[in-house]
Image: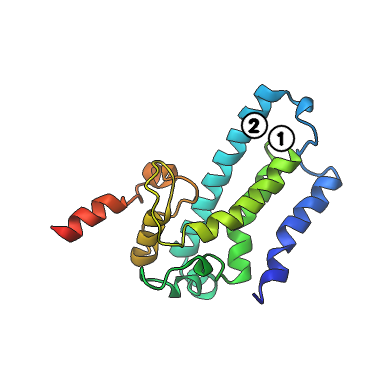
Amino acid sequence: MKGMPLYVSLPTLSEYMIERGWTRCYLSISEVGIFNYVLLTALYLMLVEFGIYWMHRGLHDIKPLYKWLHATHHIYNKENTLSPFAGLAFNPIDGILQASPHVIFIFIVPTHFFTHELSLFVESVWTTNIHDCIHGKVWPIMGAGYHTIHHTTYRHNYGHYTIWMDWMFGTLRDPLESQKVKSS
């Protein structure tokens, strides 16, 4: 809870930059048309997923970053200690770094202002959801089953909304496969 003032700094900063016209955000879908809106939103979300994957993986692979920023989050490393609260139990700088792709890519991809704001809100809801240990088993969504494996192995399932980045970069571990191995 101490980190909340810092957590709100990223969306506040992004809104400030949008209002100043420093980003590629637009206010009305009619500025780009519905077809381009859908395409640009899909591109924005794919880039955000890519950015979060590499930011999260970097926080594990670069040992000083893990030690000083991300290890706090991983004190919740067993199925019975994970909870939605673990999704918010971050060093504030860690949380800002992992959410930063949402802001970085509004400088590159034309993005609807409300879509960007909504993506930041969904980020916080999703972060609590993937720590609740309730695996919805909706492929290709990175549900709690995948993320629980991340918290117990530290080397798998860095992705955020989907499993695509882990699949592409060889870090995917499927919870159903893990259950088969345990029961054998």
Q: Position of residue 165 (x, y in %)?
A: 44, 44
Quadrant for the N terminus, please.
bottom right
Let me know if residue 107 appears in the view. no
Tell me what residue is drawn at x 54 percent, y 52 percent: 52
Residue 151 picture location, percent across and down: 39, 65
Q: State the residue lying farthest toward the left.
A: 184
Residue 50 in the figure: left or right of residue 15: left
When the figure is inspected, residue 75 is found, relative to residue 9, above or below; the finding is below
Identify the secondary structure beneath mark 1: loop
Note whether 74 is above or below 164 in the view shown: below
Residue carrying label 1: 110
Closer to the chain start, of discs 1 and 2, is 2
- Number of numbered labels in the structure image: 2
Percent of width and height locating residue 39: 61, 28
Q: How many residues crowd around disc 1 within 10 Å: few (fewer than 14), some, or many (20 or more)?
A: some
At 37% from the left and 56% from the top, the residue drawn is 145
| Residue drawn at 71 percent across, 35 percent down | 110
> Who is closer to the viewer here, 13 or 138?
138
Give the amino acid at mark 1.
Pro
Residue at the right extreme? 20
In the image, what residue occupies the spot 62% across and 38% down? 44
Q: Are marks 1 and 2 in contact (CB under 8 Å)?
A: yes
Q: Where, by quadrant of the figure, is residue 134 drawn?
A: bottom left
Q: Give the answer, above or below, for where 167 lies relative to 127.
A: above
Residue 90 x/y as whole percent: 56, 70
Colouring used for the render? rainbow
Instruction: Report the amino acid beneath label 2.
Output: Leu
Which residue lies under the disc numbered 2?
40
Does the image show residue 109?
Answer: yes
Q: CA distance from mark 1 to mark 2?
A: 7 Å
Task: Locate residue 143 relative to residue 29 in the image: left or right.
Answer: left
Q: Residues within 10 Å of mark 2 (few under 14, many from 20)?
A: some
